[in-house]
Amino acid sequence: MKKISLFLVLAMSVMLLAGCSNKKNDETTQAPTQASETEAPTTAAEETEPETEVKETRDGYVRSHLTGQWIDEEIGKKRPIAVMINNIQAALPQSGISQADVIYECMVEGGLTRLMAIFQSVDGMDKIGPVRSARTYYVYLAGEWNAFYFHYGQCEYAKPYLSAYITQNVNGVMGSDGNAYYRTDDRPAPHNAYTSGERIETMLENKAESDGYIRNLDEFYATLQEVYTSEIEPEYTEHFRFAKDDEIITLDGGMTAENIEVGFTTNNSTFTYDSATNKYLHSQYGGAHIDMENGEQLAFDNVIIIYSEKDDYYGTQYLQFNLWSGGDGYYMTQGKAIPIHWDKNTEWGPMIFQDEDGNDITLNQGKTWISIVPTEDKERTVIE
């Protein structure tokens, strides 16, 4: 399995110390060919200015980086919040998860899956969780979004990444960071740790006053030194290309995708397309995936499945996924699916999704679910 040098160095250091491009749209930017001697020169009258897309603006509003929808400017300019969510059956039902704009699902040890919910805003949310521990590959995913990463502990192999300023995190087992979390008495530990919008905002305000360091989210930020700021930099690289307000992506010519079995066997993660709402409803463990706080079933406008090579850390139970070398997958929306390819322009850059012709896919505005399935389990995916 292909490894990145930083990944190997950090992982080996933990073992010794602890004992355990956009592809630039694949724009194949070709140099303009010079006119041959037989071609007539272009006259001034024939010269035209290249067309440029005019960026739409609305007073007091900006486009959400997560959903592509118009949101309040004060909310939209803030960095997103990524929270690790316990997804073992004993931790269900979860709280606040239906309010997430993007959710990642990936395997952890024992064949279980864990979720990372990314929120544009946590204002007014009283209960989010249960919150669980970090894994190395989730640190990468949170870093892609330039998100504040909230987690309760970590596996040993994630420690170098969390302490190397790759992403800014709030760890429930690290000193004052524990103030961002609380425990309930309705279920046993470790399935009863939660956070809230107020606790998150208070913690970030405190850190903004006290913490400063060099962030290394991408090669652009490699030498950027600043405080623990909550605002997105103007140069932030978008993850998704979203449809315009008056546009609906229907994937004409794609395969039927009204019932989807993702490929995880332990929780049997599935989606059913609801033609009445044009959304995919998520189920797991044989029933609807429900948010305890509002009784709603999780629903998404876009579903992405990608396949990634999986390995373990030196024969331990802890997994690692190769999220740098690219691979295949599927994009589902409006009851249709197309094959896609995913890749990265840099190790810490955003994951890029392209169709079979090498064009960046366009997502419908709204919420997105991304499942990362081991390549070895690709045949378990069923789309019909």
Image (cartoon, rainbow, N blue to C red):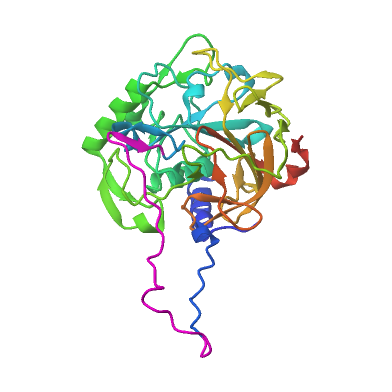
Residue at 46% across, 52% down: 348
Q: Is residue 294 magenta?
A: no
Residue at 50% across, 33% down: 366
Q: Nearer the viewer, residue 35 or 312?
A: 35
Query: So how many labels did they put on this image?
Result: 0
Residue at 77% across, 38% down: 380
Q: Position of residue 246 (x, y in %)?
A: 49, 37
Secondary structure mostly seen in the magenta stretch: loop
Q: Nearer the viewer, residue 86 or 117?
A: 117
Judged left or right of residue 148, residue 270 is right
Range drawn in magenta: 36-64
Above or below, comparing residue 259 to residue 355 in the picture: above
- Decide if residue 20 is in sight here: no
- Decide if residue 180 is in sight here: yes
Q: Residue furthest top?
A: 186
Q: Quadrant of residue 227?
A: top left
Q: Residue furthest front?
A: 45
Residue at 78% across, 42% down: 379
Quadrant of image for the N terminus:
bottom right
Q: Position of residue 188 (x, y in %)?
A: 54, 14
Quadrant of image for the C terminus:
top right
Q: Position of residue 120 (x, y in %)?
A: 40, 32
Q: Position of residue 211 (x, y in %)?
A: 26, 40
Q: Is residue 39 magenta?
A: yes
Q: Residue furthest left?
A: 209
